[in-house]
Image (cartoon, rainbow, N blue to C red):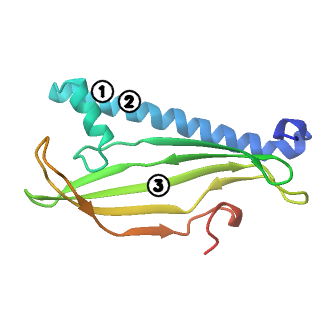
Amino acid sequence: MQTMWDRSPETRVGTKAGLTVMWVLVLTTSTVTLHSASSRAAETDEPSTELAKKLANPLANIISVPLQSNWDFGIGPKDAMRYTLNIQPVIPFALNDHWNLIIRTILPVINAETAMAGMDSVSGIGDITQSFFFATNAEPGDWMWGAGPVLLWPTTTDRLLGAGR
């Protein structure tokens, strides 16, 4: 199995640069998330369990920036690797006393080794998925529901990283 580290330095440069950019995004976004969560807890004197419940609820009235990290191995005849970091900011807006508009965006940052001979490894941004949920403004312990459209924005930086539309 050939990894990106088995290749010549000339062919690794783009892949290494892509990984560096991804790790900078991971560390920066993690710092922002941790800072905003701790600031919110300090401002409102909420117990950490209540804050944890709100962060776990995708319809909660709290701004969050969760990160999802995916490693895929054994792709194609070259047993290639693909790393995807999904940056998923969630921003709620109060429309009135009973309804919220919650906007959730998924921005995939991808580094994919070549899966077949004759192709280059690619790094960049995938297609952005954006959800708009209209949700009830429920009290703790009450049922909460939300519904709304989901849009796929063709924002990929390389045709191999997106849906190709």
- Judging by the rendered image, the residue that carries numbered circle 2 is 34
Residue at 25 percent across and 43 percent down: it is 62
Would you call the spot at circle 3 few (<14 residues within 10 Å), some (14-19), or many (20 or more)? many
Please say if 155 is above or below 50: below
Q: Which residue ends up furthest to the left in the rendered image?
A: 97
The residues bearing labels 1 and 3 have C-alpha atoms spaced at a distance of: 23 Å
- Judging by the rendered image, the residue that carries numbered circle 1 is 38
The quadrant in which residue 148 appears is bottom left
Q: Is residue 139 left or right of residue 149?
A: left
The percent coordinates of residue 87 (x first, y second) are 48, 47
Identify which amino acid the numbered label 1 is placed on. Answer: Ser
Q: Which mark is residue 106?
A: 3
The quadrant in which residue 125 appears is bottom right
Would you call the spot at circle 2 few (<14 residues within 10 Å), some (14-19), or many (20 or more)? few
Q: Is residue 46 left or right of residue 102?
A: left
Q: Is residue 152 left or right of residue 2?
A: left
Asked whether the residues under the numbered discs 1 and 2 touch, taking CB atoms below 8 Å apart as contact, a structural biologist would say yes
Q: How many marks?
A: 3
The percent coordinates of residue 101 (x first, y second) are 23, 60
Residue at 89 percent across and 44 percent down: it is 10
Identify which amino acid the numbered label 3 is placed on. Answer: Ile
Q: Which residue ends up furthest to the bottom in the rendered image?
A: 165
Q: Quadrant of the C terminus?
A: bottom right
Choose the circle earlier in sequence order: 2 or 3: 2
Residue at 55 percent across and 53 percent down: it is 108
Q: Considering the numbered disc 2 on the image, is that residue within a helix, a strand or a loop?
A: helix
Residue at 68 percent across and 40 percent down: it is 19
Q: Is residue 34 left or right of residue 43?
A: right
